[in-house]
Amino acid sequence: MRAYLSLEYPGRTRQVDKQRNVTVMLVAGEPSGDQLGAQLMAALKSLDKDVTIVGAGGPAMIAQGLEPLFTIDTTSVMGLREVVPRVPGILRRVREASDFALKSRPDTLVIIDSPDFTHRIAQRLKRFDRSIPVINYAPPQVWASRSYRAKRMARYIDAVINFFPFESEFFRRYGIPAYCAGYPVVERANRIRGGAAFRNSHGIAAGVPVLAVLPGSRRNEIRFILPVFRRAVEILAREIPGLVSVIPTVGHVAGLVRSVAADWPTPVRVIEDDDERFAALDAADAGLAASGTVTTELALARKPMVVGYKLGWLTYLLARPFIHVSSIVLINLVLERQAVPEFIQSACTPEALAQAVKSLLVDQQARARQLRDLDEAVRAFGLGSESPSERAARAVLAIARKQGPELVAD
């Protein structure tokens, strides 16, 4: 005799077979979410070999066996100038994903990062069927800006799986069950290796200074940030003899990156392969990075860094009143101090970036001081404890099996 659990949702009662295999639908919209999705897929499969995973993502999720409804080429956008011309394509993907969920009726839909895209899928799904639980993995940082969005999220998000305890407390205040899994980026620590082999294969001698230049993974970031980084490297090239640059990038912006790097002021290697990207971080002496996941990867690699970030002036003008945090660098937020130099918008100048990077390359005290801070931040992110992706996967499976989000909220 089969066991069933009756679940009450607004407008519908759903009978759930607790013994059958579960189907989890994942949707990621950009490279950072794709990486998180791939790690979550691996953890789901390790916990339940019979789980079925469907949805949309990028190369990392495809490498884990996903047959995607679509890839992230259309949806990985940011900034008004980039978003507006792509709106029809993005809305088409929203319809495709939500229609697929309505037709296939997975046991849960997990939307990952990219809230401007993935939350529209959740909203459309809930308009037609409120019985499919929606989990937001890596929810938007509404605690940092536009906190009013959390109240709206409670209408179409059944649970969030976030990275840090303070986020859980925030979402619960708005009635959203929250589970703190830890920061899954720390799981990439064992992939950051092969620096010596990287230098050897690219003809970079052991003592040559290497700067990892990481301008982001969105077209708008490449457009606004990479030219500034290039001019900063031009200044550094005059002051750091023999400097070599490596620019890890991803497929959908690789062409744009290569076009900017065509007349780069130092010898440069543009890297697309994922394993080579981690090896390049291991090979580097320092990083010049846009704000984002890569700052944690640099911390895991124990590479001191400088962060620069710029938006289009109109995008920044509209966003600025809603930003309520003192830093855009997660390391600085967690440590509650300016461990990593950051230069935002008008402060993001080639001269300022070059001076800060030079200090980390030639001043051993400044270098050692930041490395101590990075080690402290990495410990705070959860390195050395249980896998965050495994914690997240257990929460997803519990909700998919209708054990209820309240049973997995920490």
Image: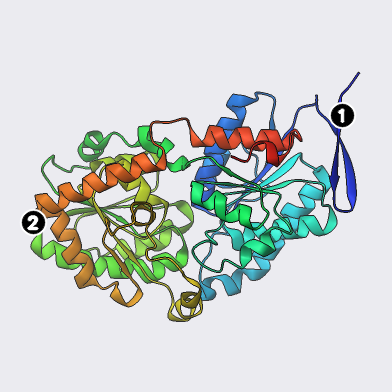
Q: Is residue 328 visible?
A: yes
User: What kind of element bears circle 1?
Assistant: strand
The amino acid type, in three-letter code, at marker 2 is Pro
Q: Residue at x 26, y 73 (%)?
A: 349
Up-down relation of residue 213 to residue 354 (above or below): above
Up-down relation of residue 255 to residue 85 (above or below): above
Percent coordinates x, y for residue 202 in the rendering:
23, 42
Q: Quadrant of the C terminus?
A: top right
Q: Quadrant of the N terminus?
A: top right
Q: How far is the residue under mark 2 from the one under mark 1?
A: 70 Å
The amino acid type, in three-letter code, at marker 1 is Tyr
Percent coordinates x, y for residue 328 in the rendering:
39, 62
Choose between 158 and 192: the one closer to the eye: 158
Q: Residue furthest top?
A: 1
Q: Which residue is mark 2?
A: 241
Choose between 289 and 236: the one closer to the eye: 289
- How many numbered circles does the render carry? 2
- Point out the tag, 2 or 1, that comes first from the N-terminus: 1
Along the horizontal axis of the image, is 315 left or right of 403? Answer: left
Q: Hey, which quadrant is residue 49 in on the image?
A: top right
Q: Is residue 64 visible?
A: no
Q: How is the image coloured?
A: rainbow
Along the horizontal axis of the image, is 188 left or right of 213? Answer: right
Q: Residue at x 79, y 53 (%)?
A: 99
Q: Which mark is residue 4?
A: 1
Q: Which mark is residue 295?
A: none
Q: Residue at x 48, y 32 (%)?
A: 387
Choose between 199 and 360: the one closer to the eye: 360
Crowd class of label 2 (few under 14; some 14 to 19; many from 20; radius 10 Å)? few
